[in-house]
Image: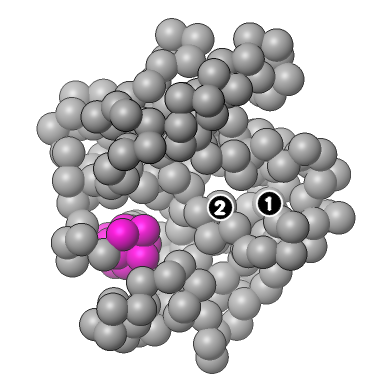
Amino acid sequence: MSQIPISAAILAGGKSTRMGKEDKSLLVINGITFIESIRNKLGEYFTEILVVSDKGERFEEMGFLVYPDLIADKGPLGGLYTALSLSQTKKIFLVACDMPLLNEVLVSNFISQVSDEDVLIPLHNSNPEPLFAVYDRNCLPSIINNIENEKLDMTSFFSGLNIRYLEEKIWREWDSEGISFRNINTPEDFEFSKKINEGGGVD
């Protein structure tokens, strides 16, 4: 576990259009909602877990600390900006609310790698995974500049920052199938996630 203070932020602002449901974060596996499952898996490693969402009342009733986007309608990048701006710590671990298959072993070992970089991010099939990454508050000037210029891709602000990529051969020692990065976007994905959990393949 990292000795550097890190908060966790769950992004819960998506539209769930492909799922055909009002809110993916409230889908239930094994009697628990996605977002509560994620909180349970993160709770051992982070003293602060916040949710970035404009549906505050719903999540506050579930005991979450919720912040609305400081700048509306800017997608995940806007959520990252809000989390970094308002978290108690200088670094945050960012995850999406539709990733209930998080592997706690991967989370624990991943954050233990955190050092003085501005971004620690895993590579998966040679591509970065920006919704499973640790960001430093040093990123804020670059993020707000990109938001102001409508450059909203999650890796668009990386230029000029200290980015450290975690190679696939390293993280696969902790999550051999890369299941933690699986977003549940469609009804088919949802059925897959239920089968994984029922089969005990993912903690």
Q: Quadrant of residue 97?
A: top left
Q: Is residue 148 above or below residue 185?
A: below
Magenta stretch in the rendered image: 75-86
Residue type marked 1? Phe
For the point 39% across and 45% down, the residue is: 10
Q: Could you tell me residue 87's position as x and y percent? A: 33, 58
Q: Are marks 1 and 2 in contact (CB under 8 Å)?
A: yes
For the point 41% across and 16% down, the residue is: 28
Q: Is residue 83 magenta?
A: yes
Considering only order in the chain, which callout, 2 or 1, is on the residue closer to the N terminus? 1
Q: Nearer the viewer, residue 186 or 94?
A: 186
User: Number of marks in the image?
Assistant: 2
Mark 1–mark 2 distance (CA, rounded to whole Å): 10 Å
Any part of residue 3 in sight: no
> Secondary structure of the magenta portion, mostly?
helix
Q: Nearer the viewer, residue 154 or 88?
A: 154
Q: Is residue 118 magenta?
A: no
Any part of residue 92 in sight: yes
Q: Residues within 10 Å of mark 2 (few under 14, many from 20)?
A: many
Which residue does the numbered mark 2 point to in the structure image?
132
Q: Could you tell me residue 93's position as x and y percent? A: 50, 54
Which residue does the numbered mark 1 point to in the structure image?
110
Q: Nearer the viewer, residue 32 or 43?
A: 32
Q: Residues within 10 Å of mark 1 (few under 14, many from 20)?
A: many
For the point 53% across and 25% down, the residue is: 188
Residue type marked 2? Phe
